Image (cartoon, grey):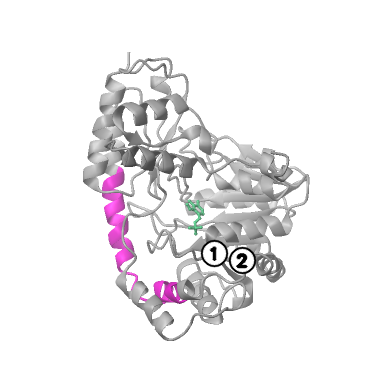
Amino acid sequence: MAFLADSLARIKPSATIAVTNKARELKAAGRDVIGLGAGEPDFDTPDNIKEAAIKAIRDGKTKYTAVDGMPELKSAIAAKFMRENGIAYKPAEITVGTGGKQVLYNALMATLNPGDEVVIPAPYWVSYPEMVALAGGTPVEIATTLEAGYKVAPADLDRAITPRTKWVIFNSPSNPTGAAYTHAELRTLADVLLKHPHVWVLTDDMYEHLVYDGFRFATFVEVEPSLVTRTLTVNGVSKAYAMTGWRIGYGGGPRELIQAMATIQSQSTSNPSSISQWAAVEALTGPQDFIPKNAELFRQRRDLVVSMLNQARGIACPRPEGAFYVFPSCAGTIGRTTAGGRKIGDDVDFVTGLLEEEGVAVVQGSAFGMAPHFRISYATSNAALEEACTRIQRFCGGLR
Ligand SMILES: Cc1ncc(COP(=O)(O)O)c(C=O)c1O
């Protein structure tokens, strides 16, 4: 349509949201569908956080706040960075947005010029390349392999960097693979970054608290403190505190960048909801004991899903360190025909067949830059996961 901006031609709508909508449609039409597409915890927001928000409303904390976050929340975030990551960000080096998504968007909008490159390891969260393109930059993918646990090799990172590279985006634990980098692995990547002082690091630590089997989370500035002058450390309350709907994310970085991001936010959305900000203060400063409890539930679900998927014919599923996703390969199903007579030529055919014939909604790996794979979110009940995996086994077992 001629009326729409050219920039829209550069981006596509979120594939994960599309799958969720399709599953919802089928459900509304009376079909028995298990949705494993959504990227959010199935737990409820803890009561102490809800109460803090209710109190904020009662106390009249319902007005505009400082554009990129009220001082009370910035202090709570600074304390969090120190307590959990050993990073000494001052409040002026902290920004708060309407979800981590807005923080990432602001950072790219504030820094990218046409022709600037942003290095993104694949598979990646669907929004990174789209946001880069929308901001006028050029996404540059680095391929990884299932065998290497979907982690980028230092030599490949080195090779992907050019004089035009502005940012490298890292996401550990990862959406969509669940892969998380150890301190030692980040060290080898930090060494590459030290060779390229013009490159900035955008680290998306959204799944920090969802790591299993004693894995120790690490982030770049903690591993290599000198990177603090060119890193934006992004995090948020959505995943760890089951607060996806509240829309609070934050970042720590050099003051000049933080100010530029606030300028963008001041001319778009202004402050994130004041009520949600008070809830986030409680999340970050209140009791934290439910986090390991939830993580233990997620670990059990991961183990259930990984073991059942590896019993499905043609599926290979590594056991990731964190997040609530697995990213199995369906390479062993390509070229076969489903019980319903569909030919599986790629991962889109696989997920379409699975949804239509068995009522299980997952997302094709190609949406995340790696095929033929698919992503399962295991943030749902054990019973639903068991049933879904049984159906996947049946679907794969029925392939001719
Ligand atoms: C890797 C990653 N980063 C950022 C976000 C954004 O989270 P929010 O905007 O809810 O803070 C998500 C949400 O799905 C994500 O998976």
Expressed as whole percent of the image width and height from the top left, the position of residue 237 reads 45, 64
**Residue 143 inside the magenta-drawn segment:** no
Report how far apart the C-alphas of labels 1 and 2 lie in the structure. Answer: 8 Å
Q: Observer-nearest residue: 140 or 15?
A: 15
Q: Residue at x 48, y 57 (%)?
A: 206
Quarter holding the C terminus is top left
Amino acid at dot 1: Thr
Amino acid at dot 2: Thr
- Which residue position holds label 1? 98
Indicate left or right for 127 with 209 as reference: right
Residue reaching furthest to the top: 400
Q: Which residues fall within the magenta stretch?
A: 278-302
- Neighbour class for label 1 at 10 Å: few (<14), some, many (≥20)? many
Q: Residue at x 27, y 35 (%)?
A: 389
Quarter holding the N terminus is top right
- Which residue position holds label 2? 269
Expressed as whole percent of the image width and height from the top left, the position of residue 76 reads 49, 77
Q: Residue at x 59, y 77 (%)?
A: 91
Tell me if I can see residue 145 in this picture.
no
Expressed as whole percent of the image width and height from the top left, the position of residue 199 reads 71, 52
Q: Main secondary structure of the magenta part?
A: helix
